[in-house]
Amino acid sequence: MEVDTDIFLDSGLEETAVLRRYIDLAKYLSLLKSKSLYLCRTDLLQEKFEGSFTPSLRASIEESYLANKINFTYDDFKRKLREHVYVSCWSLGIDDNAALWSLYGKSECSVALTTTVGALRRTLQSWQSPGSLAIREVKYVKHWRDPSLDINPYSKVFQYKVSAYAFEKEVRVILDVMPPKDFGNAENAEAFLVPFQPASFVRSVVVSPEAPEWFVELVSDVTKLYGINASVKRSMLAFDPI
């Protein structure tokens, strides 16, 4: 059955805009084999600042619980929210990012998978989502300066990250499975897998600038083996500028 899921797309994101995801070989092979995009539950992300609120928002949440005599704290709220929101993280832009190669490639045997905003949106639209979906461009803020954040719905707080990470130029798929009335008590899955068609989703595969030649050939062969005709090329950072 064909599905046409509603996807919120930030107005500033063009359909043709290029997205990159830096991953090691194991994750690339898993992605090709499963033909699925991985949406991770946000409480399992390594970044401790994920889902952070500002001082004013924290105070407002705490005051609301006290005023309504609800036995729930801000820390309870933040923990439960993180257990009900899932993300897939991409970097916006066609150019290489040396810092992201180091952070997320983590070895010379890594790749940057590229696609477009439009291809990502179409993939999500064809999936029968268990909650609301959005593709949002991350905004980088200094939380300690108490900026005004739009958190309607609450899951939108994951559109904001600490300004120290601005170099990532991140675009996120945000899946919100929070029940409409309360958080509920059921345990949520650690991740959701979104099926996609590699041949139409993958725009190109960029190989780490530090990769040996045999690895470039291996990635090219494996990519073709899975029926993907997209170009496989070494990062421009491997070459001296003229």
Image: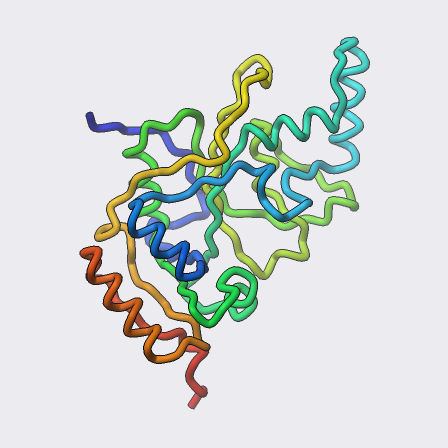
- Which residue is drawn at the image coordinates 55% and 58% (left, top)? 168
Q: Does residue 62 appear to the left or right of 219 in the view shown?
A: right
Q: Quadrant of the N terminus?
A: top left
Q: Position of residue 137 (x, y in %)?
A: 50, 47
Q: How is the image coloured?
A: rainbow
**Towards the viewer: 38 or 151:** 38
Q: Is residue 186 above or below residue 48?
A: above
- What is the quadrant of residue 143 in the picture? top right
**Towards the viewer: 10 or 174:** 174
Q: Does residue 215 appear to the left or right of 198 in the view shown?
A: right
Q: Is residue 150 above or below residue 209?
A: above
The residue positioned farthest toward the bottom in the image shown: 242
- What is the quadrant of residue 132 in the picture? top left
Q: Quadrant of the C terminus?
A: bottom left
Q: Is residue 11 above or below residue 233?
A: above
- What is the quadrant of residue 127 in the picture? top left
- Which residue is drawn at the image coordinates 38% and 38% (left, top)? 193
